[in-house]
């Protein structure tokens, strides 16, 4: 039998049910794996005692035949989800020592379905970044290396610790959150599956807020089936989040029939842009060929406002962030830096507590919302966002799902793209449009670059049609047969 | 749109983030660079296009105007940097 941490969630579920191994054994194997992979810096806080306690409960349930959907499955929890009495940092200095007195809805749902928490995974500060280098707790390393080049690479971001942990086989799955690509881009960089469900599918309650009209939680796993299993455990209506959708959670796993005959797949012509690596263009064509071989029809579509998605995003997301992050004032939780007056205390605390990228985004957001500029920037962006959303609506009159690359390049070295914020923002060029339109989208590992790094393909679907997205992703996964593993994983 | 130092200082005051003088210059450059890139939105005709307020067509639910939660002040102040009894504290604001 393979090493326990390299099993998929579905395989582990079967093994636990057949009593091939216990939840405690599975958890202990993962705790050891987490310890031996500390060089990756995937976790901000490890929680082995909690994990072992949860595993014991799982074993009791497995024994009594009362196993739940994720019973005994060890996962990483992105450190943006509030976890009761467990340090929750959002990778920011300003949340020093913050131990929430409550549990986020998504994490509570996972514990209620039997999942086991290995720890809180690292991320970009307040989920603002595409490389995990803005974390106050230092960057995460991608477990992959370029062939013949041992320089550490970024895992992508913002859910970089989650992606690295899953790829390195130290967690069977991990939660991510995606505001403009923060699940899909790191999934692509680390060679795993990541799905951002429809806005409203998962409750945002208890997730440290970045941009509330965009933030959405989703699973990061090694297979599409595992993503379906974990998404079902995370999702569901929550009265505590008024934007959470009052819709039943479908049987995502059951949607993976492997049958996509007659499925209409759209290929947005505007996504073939300058600067895209040629091998990513080739992989995209290969992905279309695989879907066609499985019986799908492909057709070119137009999403004419694609090029405006990034500038729209970099108005709306910072605007909402500047408002959400106003709560960090040194009074109610986290860091306080003293000052003579109340205003001094606020200003000192926020200057010391926020890192450079977070400060930059708060300032941009404050500016675009300020008197005299609101109409020119924020309202204008909201209007262009309407056009972007309409582009998708009209495309989905002709097609069932859209295939595109996830990111324009494979993972880059830690330290690259640091000088120009816009170069970093361009990482999200293929992921931001679906975020702005609130649509479900998944990244599936589909091949390797010429220097041996994973590349992902993205499928975007209609609102609340994760089933079609996952079904097509399953077909893509089978065709791509991506079995390569990062350095050191087995 | 290019931001000068005085404008950045004003925004920083609105955002309650203390910026040193040297930082103001650097930030003015960075923000101007980002705003210049955002300017491309001016090419888009948005006449008669309403601003998008909600991505999914769901109505916000109503609920009864009733207290449904509370009664745990100790939990609320548990993470405060300098709480006193069941209160948050701030520097003196009234002489």
Image: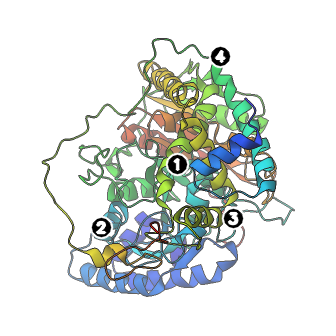
Relative to B58, is A473 on the left or the right?
A: right
Q: Which of marks 1 and 2 is nearer the N terminus?
A: 2
Which of the 4 quarters of the picture holds residue B52?
top left
Above or below: residue A75 compared with residue A239: below
Residue occupied by mark 4: B43
Q: In which quarter of the image is the C terminus of chain A?
A: bottom right
Residue occupied by mark 3: A486
User: Which x, y percent locates residue A431?
Assistant: 58, 39
Query: The residue tagged with tag 4: helix, strand or loop?
Result: helix
Q: Distance between the residues labelled 2 and 3?
A: 30 Å
Among all residues in the image, which is located at the extreme right?
A148
Look at 18% across and 42% down and name the residue there: B62
**Numbered tag placed on residue A321 in the rendering:** 1
Are discs 3 and 4 located on one and the same chain? no
From the viewer's side, name the closer residue of A156 and A232: A156
How packed is label 3: few (under 14 Cα within 10 Å), some, or many (20 or more)? Answer: many
Query: The residue tagged with tag 3: helix, strand or loop?
Result: loop
How many numbered discs sit on the rendered protein? 4
Are discs 1 and 2 located on one and the same chain? yes
Q: Which of marks 2 and 3 is nearer the N terminus?
A: 2
Query: The residue tagged with tag 1: helix, strand or loop?
Result: helix
Look at 47% across and 85% down and name the residue there: A48
User: Which x, y percent locates residue A234?
Assistant: 35, 58
How packed is label 1: few (under 14 Cα within 10 Å), some, or many (20 or more)? Answer: many
User: Which x, y percent locates residue A112?
Assistant: 28, 69
Q: How far apart are marks 3 and 1 (CA)?
A: 35 Å
Front of the two marks 2 and 3: 2
Q: Distance between the residues labelled 2 and 4?
A: 50 Å
How packed is label 4: few (under 14 Cα within 10 Å), some, or many (20 or more)? Answer: few
Q: Distance between the residues labelled 1 and 4?
A: 26 Å
């Amino acid at each position: 039998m393979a090493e326990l941490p390299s099993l998929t969630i579905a395989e582990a579920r079967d093994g636990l049910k057949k009593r091939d191994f216990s939840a405690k054994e599975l958890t202990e194997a993962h705790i050891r794996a987490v310890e031996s992979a500390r060089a990756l810096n995937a976790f901000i806080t490890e929680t082995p005692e909690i994990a072992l306690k949860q595993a014991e409960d799982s074993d009791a349930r497995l024994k009594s035949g009362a196993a739940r959907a994720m019973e005994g499955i060890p996962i990483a929890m992105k450190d943006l989800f509030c976890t009761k009495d467990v340090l929750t940092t959002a990778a920011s200095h300003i949340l020093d020592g913050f131990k929430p007195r409550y549990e986020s809805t998504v994490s509570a749902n996972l514990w209620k379905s039997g999942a086991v928490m290995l720890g809180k995974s690292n991320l970009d500060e307040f989920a603002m970044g595409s490389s995990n280098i803005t974390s106050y707790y230092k960057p995460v390393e991608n477990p992959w290396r370029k062939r013949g080049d041992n320089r550490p690479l970024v895992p992508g971001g913002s859910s970089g610790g989650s992606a690295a942990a899953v790829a390195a086989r130290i967690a069977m799955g991990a939660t991510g959150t995606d505001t403009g690509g923060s699940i899909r881009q790191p999934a692509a960089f680390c060679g795993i599956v990541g799905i951002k469900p429809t806005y409203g599918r998962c409750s945002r309650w208890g997730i440290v807020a970045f941009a509330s009209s965009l933030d959405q939680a989703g699973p990061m796993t090694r297979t599409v089936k595992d993503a379906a299993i974990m998404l079902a455990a995370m999702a569901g209506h929550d009265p505590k989040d008024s934007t959470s959708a009052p819709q039943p959670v479908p049987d995502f796993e059951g949607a993976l029939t492997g049958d996509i005959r007659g499925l209409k797949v759209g290929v947005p012509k505007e996504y073939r842009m300058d600067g895209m690596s040629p091998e990513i263009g080739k992989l995209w064509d290969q992905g279309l060929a695989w879907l066609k071989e499985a019986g799908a029809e492909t057709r070119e579509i137009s999403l004419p406002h694609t090029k405006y998605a990034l500038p729209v995003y970099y108005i709306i997301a910072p605007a909402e962030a500047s408002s959400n992050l106003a709560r960090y004032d040194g009074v109610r939780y986290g860091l306080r830096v003293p000052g003579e007056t109340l205003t001094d205390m606020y200003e000192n605390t926020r200057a010391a507590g926020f890192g450079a990228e977070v400060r930059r985004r708060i300032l941009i957001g404050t500016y675009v919302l300020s008197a005299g500029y609101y109409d020119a920037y924020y309202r204008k962006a909201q209007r262009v966002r309407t056009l972007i959303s309409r582009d998708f609506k009209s495309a989905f009159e002709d097609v069932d799902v859209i295939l595109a690359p996830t990111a324009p390049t494979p993972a880059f070295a830690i330290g690259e793209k640091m000088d120009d914020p816009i170069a970093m923002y361009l990482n999200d060029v293929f992921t931001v449009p679906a975020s702005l339109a609130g649509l479900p989208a998944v990244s599936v590992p589909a091949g390797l670059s010429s220097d041996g790094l994973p590349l992902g393909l993205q499928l975007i679907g209609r609102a609340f049609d994760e089933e079609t997205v996952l079904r097509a992703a399953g077909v893509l996964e089978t065709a791509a047969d991506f079995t390569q593993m990062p350095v050191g994983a087995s | 749109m290019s931001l000068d130092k005085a404008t950045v200082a004003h925004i920083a005051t609105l955002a309650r983030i203390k910026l040193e003088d040297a930082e103001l210059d650097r930030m003015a450059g960075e923000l101007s660079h980002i705003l210049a890139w955002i300017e491309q939105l001016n090419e888009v005709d948005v006449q008669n296009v309403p601003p998008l307020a909600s991505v999914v067509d769901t109505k916000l639910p109503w609920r009864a105007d009733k207290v449904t939660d509370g009664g745990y002040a100790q939990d609320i102040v548990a993470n405060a940097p300098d709480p006193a009894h069941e209160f948050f504290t701030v520097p003196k604001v009234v002489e």
